[in-house]
Image (cartoon, rainbow, N blue to C red):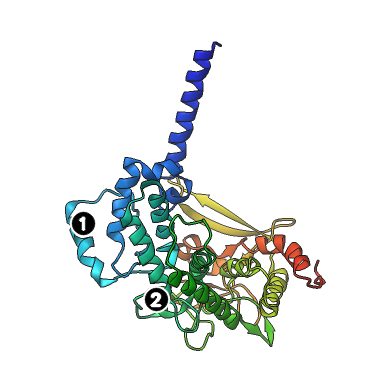
Amino acid sequence: MNQLKKTVLLLLICSNYYVNGQEKAKKWPDLIIKSYSAWFGSEEGKKIGENVLLYQRDIGGWPKNIQMLKELTEEEKEKLIALKPTGKDCTIDNRATTQEILFVSKMYAQTKEEKYKDSFLRAIDYLLSAQYPNGGWPQFFPLKKGYYTHITYNDNAMVDVLNVLREIGNETNYYSIKPPKETVDKAKIAFEKGIDCILKTQYKQNGVLTVWCAQHDEVTFAPADARAYELASLSGKESAKVVLLLMSIENPSPEVKTAVKSAYDWFEKTKITNLREERIYDEDGKIIGKKMYPTEDVAPIWPRFAELDTNEAIFCDRDGIKKRFITDIGEERRNGYSWYSNEPKEVLKKYKKWAKKNNLEKTDSE
């Protein structure tokens, strides 16, 4: 093969790789993470950037579950402009606002357009304004009636916010925009208050620290219900990201060390090593069947919801009635919700090294 043919073939391969890479990023928020840096300066990037700015409310936050890639009609644009002063539906749930913060940062890095810088700074101010005096964050701000006012660890909402504010407070280069010193100082304080809130909400079971509920009462810190099928319980899923955040703190306080060790012990105590999940999918990739089978030598999993006092897995339909086994609930909730999680495996994987670094004694299970 001569040099010209080699060059053409290489260009075709690179072009195909770029296209396929972009195809994989055609869902929001995957596009934010998977797109090449240069894409954010492209015409397509700028077009989507305009959508992102339209969805941002004047208060600085964004609504959730929006496919920002969708082309907007003039009527839709007018409705979004009318919503801007209301602050309606601004949230940190499902990565809303924190993911858009990263997007506008990447847009600014490529375009240097002030509108993206302004968007970024208003969004950081929004996160700071939404924090409760006790250090927690509600799911929606302005506050929305119902369980949305609870301190929200669900779907890693509060952890996502704290990760953003730590980058701001530490003045790292993760974001392309450097906020003023006043904002940096506020971010540092907000992060510390958030960690203090995490420590105060860690659940004690018969006097022993365990993990966290997906949401906690914003006044009493007690585990709290959310939707009808999301009862107050210990979360095997959400607690994992909380612990990993605590483990990432440099020079942790004795309280943080105790919190991490206690959660690690709970994960070790409650891991399930004799169940395997089997899923059945339809032609569109939707789950239409889900069952748990007894087996041996499988990777550990944890219940999404565990009883506050016994650690037993609990399951629930939309009627709010607690059930003991996943087969006790109807197919709609059984197939449409994640009742088990493997996320705590990262805590188990990293704990030994973390414990050694922080001069903790080995646990009996190590």
Q: Which mark is residue 76?
A: 1
Q: Which residue, given by chain and number where applicable, does mark 2 sit on?
A: 129
**Residue 313 x, y percent position in the rendering:** 61, 72
Of the residues shown, which amino acid type is indicated by label 1?
Glu
Indicate whether 298 appears above or below 268. Answer: above
| Position of residue 32 in the picture relative to residue 294 (left or right) | left
Which of 119/234 is in front? Answer: 119
- Within 10 Å of disc 1 (Cα), the crowding (few <14, some 14-19, many 20+) is few
- Front residue of this view, candidates 4 and 322: 4
Q: Is residue 312 above or below residue 93?
A: below
Q: Residue at the spot x=24%, y=70% of the render?
A: 85
Residue drawn where x is 42% and y is 71% of the image:
127
Q: Classify mark 2: residues with Cα within 10 Å, few (<14), some (14-19) or many (20+).
A: some
Quarter of the rendering occupied by the C terminus = bottom right
- Is 198 on the left-hand or right-hand side of 37? right
Q: Position of residue 224 (x, y in %)?
A: 50, 81
Residue at the location (42% across, 51% down)? 106
In depth, the one of 354 and 138 nearer the eye is 354
From this viewpoint, is residue 230 visible? Answer: no
Three-letter code, disc 2: Ser
